[in-house]
Amino acid sequence: MKIDIYTDGACSGNPGKGGYGIIMKIIEKNYEKRFSEGFRLTTNNRMELLAVIVALEKLKTPQENVHLYTDSKYVANAINEKWIFGWIKKQFKGVKNDDLWRRFVPLMKTHQLHFHWVKGHAGHTENEICDQLAVKASQGSKLSIDAFFEQQKNGGLFGEG
């Protein structure tokens, strides 16, 4: 079964308030589901990647044929250009957002993933909807905490780097 996943991240300021939006579709089953979440302090790249992770975590069965559409070259190139394998070899040393990439790796191994880059803000229907979901989530009154990011930004727990 083919699953189409569309994702987008948004951030007002970088870092700033952020959010992600997801659309999941299974054409054969006439299924569509939308998800979004907002964060009080994060970055755009974190939201782009978190959208992918959350979408993959929602899949109930392994080895799905997943076509993932993102307007993030950061995310798409990490997979399509195989940067991720070099990062894994060096145990993510010096890699930004390593907490999220580490969370992504087991998901990458669980499904048959095909990443597709789409140009953002260019009229791609699902990408535009995901952008709207992400922006709306980032403007919500009950924003989640991107604990790893905030901890790093504030010098770690108890002031250690």
Image: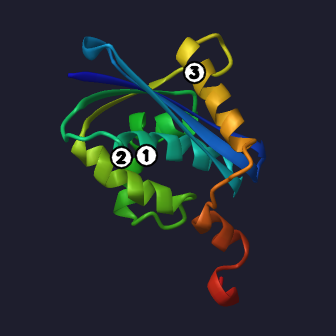
Query: Is the residue under label 2 in contact with that under label 3 (CB below 8 Å)?
Result: no
Disc 1 marks a residue whose amino acid type is Ile
Disc assigned to residue 127: 3
Where residue 44 appears, as percent x and y from the top left, is 67, 44
For residue 12, above or below residue 150:
above
Q: Which mark is residue 57?
A: 2
Whole-percent x, y for residue 125 in the image: 57, 12
What is the CA distance from the residue labelled 2 to the residue labelled 1?
6 Å
Q: Is residue 89 left or right of residue 61?
A: right
Tags 2 and 1 touching, CB below 8 Å: yes
Q: Could you classify mark 3 by the number of other residues whose Cα lies within 10 Å: few (under 14), some (14-19), or many (20 or more)?
A: many
Residue type pointed to by label 2: Glu
Residue that mark 1 sits on = 53
Residue 66 in picture, x, y percent from top left: 30, 29
Residue drawn at the location 36% of the way across and 59% of the way down? 88
Circle 1 Cα neighbour tier, 10 Å, few/some/many (<14 / 14–19 / ≥20): some
Query: According to the image, what is the colour scheme of the structure?
Result: rainbow
Give 144 or 84, whichever is nearer the viewer.
Answer: 144
Looking at the rendered structure, the secondary structure element under dot 1 is helix
Quadrant containing the N terminus is top left
Determine the CA span between mark 3 and mark 2.
Answer: 20 Å
Dot 2: within a 10 Å radius of its alpha carbon, few (fewer than 14), some, or many (20 or more) residues? Answer: few
Pick whichever of labels 1 and 3 is earlier in the sequence.
1
